[in-house]
Amino acid sequence: MTRMPTKPGMRLRAVIFDLDDTLVESTVNYGKFKSLVIERLISWGQDRQSYSPDETIVAILSRYEQRMNASGMSQKELDSRMAELDRIMDEVEMEHVAETKAIKGAGKLLRMLRSRGVKIGILTRGCEGYAEAALEVTGMLDSVDSIECRNSKTKAKPNPESYLRLVHALGVQKDETMFVGDHPIDAQCAANAGVPFVAVRTGEVPDEILREVGCLEVFADVSEMITWFESNLAN
């Protein structure tokens, strides 16, 4: 069933963006990323048939956490294992970050929003080092007010906790924000947080899927959003 999109509030004070395939062309080898995580899970006694590289990393990690909680594993041990998986993912993310390129119009959009007094947040499942390096390489780091990443002390998207923590860091109210991303996980996060979601096609997710999960608008890329934001900020 198609989810009805959340409408924007009366005043937009901050726009929160996903990073990979929304603002930058991802250089992360996700196949390697997931395969290494799965191999580590298997080394801890997990069944290979229970995890597939075809799944999202969100699904893989969530299933493992649920199974360990059900098994009675101590929180301290689980936290230690999840931190080890984080380190594996961090290493893969950083391998080619120096080659990161901005998606067309990304820097221009951020600068335009900042010139209108709109704050910029980045919500990513990438690690802090990767997010900052990718934004620095593409010349966008100075346009960003705050970053919420996988290493933060909150549950990552689609759990709304990370979004709401970023809202607090930006010093605005939830109803004064909107989320821009390329993936159904981003849309689910926005829905869970109760904020509007606007999508771009640069993640190669079909329009019908983005609209089914409650997308307010779908654009080819962030460059197409510049005029749309200018019009909405003028009203």
Image (cartoon, rainbow, N blue to C red):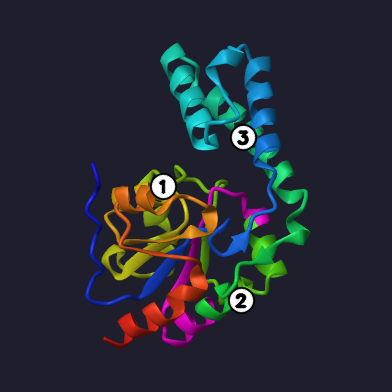
State yes or no: discs 2 and 3 in contact (Cβ < 8 Å).
Answer: no
Residue 150 position (above or below residue 143): above
Q: Nearer the viewer, mark 1 or mark 2?
A: 1
Q: Is residue 19 above or below residue 90?
A: below
Tell me the CA gap for discs 3 and 1.
25 Å
**Mark toward the viewer: 2 or 3:** 2
- Residue 52 — which label? none
Q: Which residue is mark 1?
A: 184
Q: Is residue 180 above or below residue 191?
A: below
Name the foreground residue: 158 vs 87.
Answer: 158
| Magenta highlight range | 110-130
What residue is pinned by disc 3? Answer: 83
- Locate the C terminus and report the quarter of the image it occupies: bottom left
Report how far apart the C-alphas of labels 2 and 3 lie in the structure.
Answer: 29 Å
| Residue 232 on image: x %, y % | 31, 80
Identify which residue is drawn at 65% across, 41% down. Answer: 30
- Dot 1 or dot 2, earlier in sequence: 2
At x 56% / y 72%, what residue is drawn?
106
Q: Earlier in the sequence, mark 3 or mark 1?
A: 3
Q: Is residue 113 magenta?
A: yes
> Of 212 and 173, which appears nearest the observer?
212
- Answer whether residue 189 is visible to the viewer in this image: no
Q: Helix, strand or loop at disc 2?
A: helix
Camera-near label (3 vs 1) is 1
Task: Give percent across and percent down for residue 129.
Answer: 67, 55
Quote the CA–CA distance across marks 1 and 2.
28 Å
Q: Is residue 99 left or right of residue 233?
A: right
Question: Can residue 114 be seen in this snapshot?
Answer: yes
Q: Quadrant of residue 135?
A: bottom right
- Secondary structure under the numbered disc 1 in the rendered image: helix
